[in-house]
Image: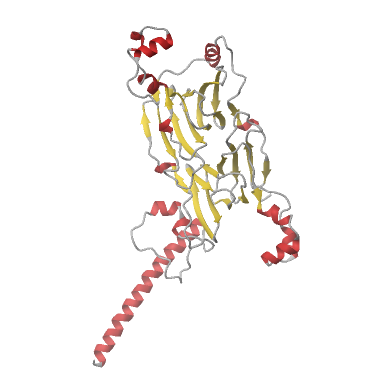
Amino acid sequence: MNDDATKDIFSRRKFLETGSVALAAVGMLATADAAAQDQNPKPTKNDRSGTDPGPVNSPLDAQNPDSTWPPSTDSRSLVQTFKYPFSFANKRTYEGGWSREVTVRELAVSKSLAGVNMRLTAGGVRELHWHTADEWAIVLYGTARITGIDRDGKSFVADVEKNDLWYFPGGIPHSIQGLEPDGTEFLLVFDDGNFSESETVLLSDSMMHLPPEVLSKNFGVVESAFKSLPRHELFIFQTAVPGKLEADQKAAAGALGKSSSDFAFRTMAIPPAKRSKGGEVRIVDSSTFKASTNVAMAMVTVHPGGLRELHWHPNADEWQYYIAGKGRMTVVSTGNRARTMDFQAGDVGYVEKTLLHYIENTGNTDLIFLEMFKSSFYQDLSLSQWLSHTPPELVMAHLNIDKATFDALPKDKVVVTPE
């Protein structure tokens, strides 16, 4: 090969190498800019693996920076996803409202609890029904009227508003109806990850599958009285807005009278169980809400810059629902595994029992989310509290820290930092 040909080859090679480096640098700078905006660690611009030149879903990547470019503290071993947005869930629409759900079919790790997000217009009704699972609920928007009976057949009728709860044990029949001016939206949580809202026992469905002569004998009326029964399930349907609460309560009570059980709970009527500079937490379980025998809740508010401290729950898996703000969570699993994921309003998160985790506010507004448990009581253990109540020399030997650092550890459970 002559000298000119050799020089030409090296010149072209140098050009290609320079061009590749330039393109990589552009990609790295773009990633670095995104990192600065997201305030999450990304590969350095000298790391040639820190580019993604193929097809990308940029809006989705922007919402999930810790999955797009995981922090270096995450493990490379597979950790089962623990996030599912309600935005991905199929929405069933009706005249009168809509419904969508996240169960173990959508989020495979969610074995103990399932969730339903539902909207009812003013007058819209979630028809009379009951479930095989217990139903816990929180009102996210507007107002609603709920009805039911207790195990003695006595009636319960109440109006609920934003942040109020209700709880109907499995087998207890009930209904929900949106009130003026704009109906309601709420979250339902069921104590079975396999449970589906479409598998409830409905009044309309039950009646249309019973022979007319049986209905006649059961209710003591002529068969023709049931000739106009619905020929399909109602599930959600539109009707008139109900009248005054007192009138409905009186009509439903009848000769038996009102139930002594209270299936509703006013969350904001109780003070926070813990409040700090970083935020606050309200805890509602069977000790405060007597009807809620198998589901416990913590409503957590984390101010900007705050952190739901490192902790774990020894008694139950944690099912989360994000109401407002932006956050991220790292879950440390067994087998030297860990993963970090990002969350926004409308997302569902899940942490298996006993796994260490935190939730950090990564936005500039309050992060508000629910911690839900299939349990009659709420329980968590704080990493800081455990370490500060273990012999100092033992902790220092484990973590290779000095006495001053050990002494600085919080001595009590903080829940939301800073204290």
Pick whichever, 138 or 62, lies toward us.
138
The tally of labels here is 0
Pick whichever, 311 or 31, lies toward us.
311
Q: By what rule are the colours in the image chosen?
A: secondary structure
* Residue pictured at 47% horizontal, 66% vertical: 43
Q: Position of residue 398 (x, y in %)?
A: 68, 65
Q: Position of residue 74 (x, y in %)?
A: 52, 61
Q: In the current view of this chain or complex, which residue is farthest to the bottom?
A: 2
In the figure, residue 121 lies in which quadrant? top left
Q: Position of residue 130 (x, y in %)?
A: 47, 26
Task: Say left or right for 396 vs 322.
Answer: right
Task: Say left or right for 215 vs 71.
Answer: left
Q: Is residue 230 visible?
A: yes
In the figure, residue 237 lies in which quadrant? top left
Q: Is residue 417 visible?
A: no
* Residue pictured at 70% horizontal, 54% vertical: 386
Give the position of the N terminus as an image quadrant. bottom left
In the picture shown, does residue 337 fall above or below 296? below
* Residue pictured at 50% horizontal, 25% vertical: 144
Q: Position of residue 323 (x, y in %)?
A: 52, 40
